[in-house]
Image (spheres, rainbow, N blue to C red):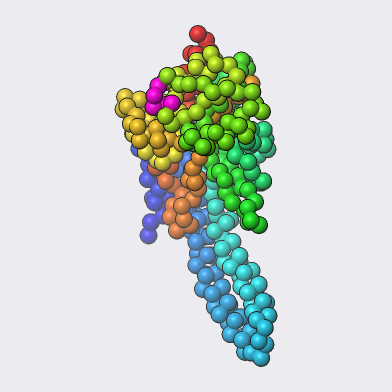
Amino acid sequence: MATASSAIPDFIEINSYEKGFSNHFKNTIKPVLEGLETTRLRYARQFKKRIFLGVLAIVLLFLFSFTLFSEWTDGSALDLPFFLSALIVLWITSPLRAYSQSAKAIYLPAVCSFFGDFKYLPTAETNIETRYRGLLFPAFDSVETEDFIEGRLGKIRMVLHETKLQQRRNKRSVTVLQALVINFEFPQAFQGRTLLKRDLGRFGNFFSKFAALPLQNLERVHLEDPLFEQYFEVYSNDQIEARVHLTTAFMERLIRLALLRSGDLKVIDPTQPLSEKAFATGKVECLFDDRFLTIVLPSSQNLFEPKSIFTSVFQADDLHVFLAQMQAIREILEILSVERRA
């Protein structure tokens, strides 16, 4: 019978920026995964047993209720069994939640340690969404954040996290944005404030311009590249600095970073030109403000989220995507560093 150790293959480096990660995986990540596999198998066995016992308990509960309260005609006889059934379902699924919460807390710190002074936190305090509500983020009533990765790339501090914004509509909560948010803090402040938004079409841009942007004293900036101009809107209170920031090289790497969320590793290759489809599907927005650059990558995908309790937490594709994202981030920061030294 295969052990947890033999079930986890080695990591194969396929790109130059992954150099050294196979050794890090073997020495640091794989031992963690082996222990996590034992935990996963234990939770999986618990879940299977609870399915059988829970379903049996629900069936017997309803049979007993129908027998005992068969003379009741107003439907209230079902209130108690439905309530107890909901509790049973929570009991059945508790191993799934426990495994999901523990897997990332154990796995991600080992992954992040490859980059040096980086750490993973399941939750942390942030006010980015509130600070830029109505500007970089849509209006919302509640915010859920998780999976914080923070550290330094040179002199630049980086904090990455997942966010989910919800709004109350007709007595129910609707998700208005689910995204990866990356916030960079530079040693020196930018001179102005520059906002890059996806083009919302004629009517969407009209309402965005006259509802929120005048409050920020931002004016429209026209980009030189026709493809950028077709798919993005730029607003700034410093026209010159905005054009210095949003060069062709910066915009291309920003779009490549956005496309990596789909798992397509080919887009990281700078020798491969971006097609118009890439511009159309590369959902990304960003804001230069004070000492911060904030990038928002809308996506319903959650990197490193355990796929299933019945499959290994080790997903080589997730690791390749994460390494590619870090490379894309480095390239963006290199461009900005050169620009600021010029």
The residue drawn where x is 57% and y is 56% is 97
The quarter in which the N terminus is drawn is bottom left
The residue drawn where x is 39% and y is 24% is 226
Residue 95, picture quadrant: bottom right
Residue 331, picture quadrant: top left
Task: Say above or below: 67 vs 105.
Answer: below
Task: Say above or below: 339 vs 283.
Answer: above
Q: Which residues are magenta?
A: 225-229
Of all residues, the one furthest to the left in this rendering is: 272
Residue 59: where, in percent of width, then height? Answer: 55, 80
Q: Is there any visible trace of residue 235 in the rendered image? A: yes
Residue 230, picture quadrant: top left
Q: Is residue 259 left or right of residue 102?
A: left
The residue drawn where x is 50% and y is 15% is 244
Q: Would residue 320 be counted in the magenta stretch?
A: no
Q: Nearer the viewer, residue 101 or 261?
A: 261
Q: Is there any visible trace of residue 297 in the rendered image? A: no
The residue drawn where x is 62% and y is 34% is 211
Residue 168: where, in percent of width, then height? Answer: 65, 51
Of all residues, the one furthest to the bottom in this rendering is: 71
Query: Majority secondary structure of the magenta segment?
Result: helix
Residue 287: where, in percent of width, then height? Answer: 57, 27
Q: Nearer the viewer, residue 303 or 227?
A: 227
Q: Nearer the viewer, residue 135 or 69?
A: 135
Task: Say above or below: 4 vs 27.
Answer: below
Residue 2: where, in percent of width, then height? Answer: 38, 56
